[in-house]
Image (spheres, rainbow, N blue to C red):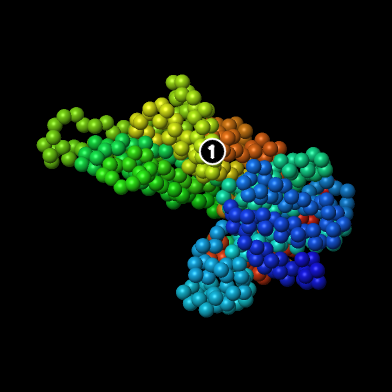
Amino acid sequence: MYEAIKSLPIKDQAEKITRALVGVKSVNGTNGEINMADKLESILRSFPYFKQHPEQVWTQVLEGDALGRKNVFALLEGGFENNKTIIYHGHMDTVGIDDFGSIEEHALDPDYLQHYFENYSKDSDVQQDAASGNWLFGRGALDMKSGDAVHLCNLLFYSEHRDQLNGNILAMFNPVEENDHEGVMKAVDELIRLKKEKNLDYVLAINGDFVSPLYKGDSRRYVYTGSAGKLLGCFYIRGRETHVGETLAGIDPTLIASNINSVLNNNMDCAEKIPDEVILPPSCLFLRDRKAFYNVQTAGTTFLYFNYFLYERTPKAVLGQLKDVAQHVCDDLELFLKKQYTVFSENCGLEGQSPDWSAAVMSYEDFAGELKSKGVPVEEITDQVIQENPQEDFRQISFKIIEALEAHAGDNRPKVIVFFAPPYCPHNYLREEVEAEKRCDQILDRVLRQAEQETGETFSKKRFFPYLADSSYLAMSESAEETASILGNFPGWGKTYSVPLEQIRKLNIPVMDMGVYGKRAHTWMERVYKPYSFGVLPQLIRSMTEGILSEFAQV
């Protein structure tokens, strides 16, 4: 690759590398992620510096990964004796290409897609962008192979101008970002190893993941000084089955689930209140009953879970909110069914005692604790479920564990069990009270002001990257006490899934997202804006790199 780009200006280098990376199909959960790692390693090894120092490019295979996916690292040591190190990082996987439909075979062909969208009259915005020639199309072009390309270009630049690098750059490219973030979590151990063995002092991590306009006509370029976190808030809902001919005698778990969904889903009253930030409400990702086939019996159980963003709120507070919502829904449903039964019985002339429509609400930790006190071998049952379902989705494993515990205990009482399932993304942001983080923030302000004067762009700084990102696993704002209070509510924690919380706290690297700019990520209209992403952003990141290393070198 080096021979093909060495004489090009950086904006053309970035585009050429982006095209090469887009051409590698690297859909999450496929062997394409391995192919992408090989491509990135090959590009790195083509740089003259790394030909001279081949040991400074290496890979880390993800232990236990069925596909054998791997992280890719490259360490560039600057021209001065300084252990201050900036991490450039990005992810190598993409979402699938099914959404391209009839042109799926061209999903990795930017030129075909540009010509296609030039003639696509159903969407004037994408048609205008394609006709301008300023946008590069294709799966991964925006999210985030162009961001990886920018990092590679800057790494190449500094490898040839080491006298401008008053410290080190560690480039890191990770798989498995688009769902469970296993790549970066495994990389945490490698970062700690490097920190010890090479005495590296990580002063900042810059993610090149994409940014987008927040509303139609928004021309600002966003830089984020932290990452939103995420919890998957889950509900296991056990009802009381009944024949539809006696429907009011039962408790329908789909009705409880629907009402919980109605309260939480896209409800800004349930979101955090932080002015001038992109704060998102909970959103439903799964709602299904457990009926396997048609009959005239109401459902017995229903599964429901929500994407829940974390900004400043603690996981414990989220658990409390989920339990409160479930309790209010169950209380309201009990009153509703009493009223309906009164109307029904009066209409039919029925007499006698009405059914009990109460349903218990509890956390998984309380449920498991209750069973343990009755002699139920919770850990053994959990292990058995995991062993019997080696390929099962993390989320479904959690529900299966609860089902198995219920069955063993013979516990069929109506109830809602509130718990968490993977992934868990910690949240982080630059804190005013932490001197090093405060200085990073101040340097960024200077860099952005200068960039506005030099480029004419309008920048806007925000605290929380609004999309889920690997940056969540390089630092965390939650205390050990806050996280400990919720780990018991992850069924199978440490067996099917865990997060290296203590290692992340040891690293605690300030993070920023200085990303490529584009539109419609995760859709077939995905595209990156070349003039900014390839023409402005590389220098912006270099200015930040040099500003941080120069100032922190004095400490």
Q: Residues within 10 Å of mark 1 (few under 14, many from 20)?
A: many
Q: Is residue 429 above or below residue 212?
A: above
Looking at this view, is 434 or 262 the one in front? 262
The N terminus, quarter of image: bottom right
Q: Residue at x 68, y 38 (%)?
A: 503
Q: Position of residue 126 (x, y in %)?
A: 53, 72
Quadrant in which the C terminus is drawn: top right
Q: Residue at x 88, y 52 (%)?
A: 80
Residue 435 appears in the picture as rendered: no
Question: Residue at image x 46%, y 41%?
Answer: 234
Answer above or below: position of 257 versus 522: above
Query: Looking at numbered disc 1 in the image, what kind of residue is underneath it?
Result: Pro
Q: Position of residue 538 (x, y in %)?
A: 73, 63
Q: 390 or 327, which lies in front? A: 390
Judge from the rendering whether residue 231 lies leftward or rightward of residue 341; answer left or right.
right
Q: Residue at x 74, y 57 (%)?
A: 41
Identify the element where label 1 is drawn.
Answer: helix
Count numbered badges in the picture.
Answer: 1
Q: Is residue 31 visible?
A: yes
Q: Is residue 64 left or right of residue 231?
A: right
Q: Is residue 532 above or below residue 244?
A: below
Q: Which residue is mark 1?
A: 315
Residue furthest to the front? 388
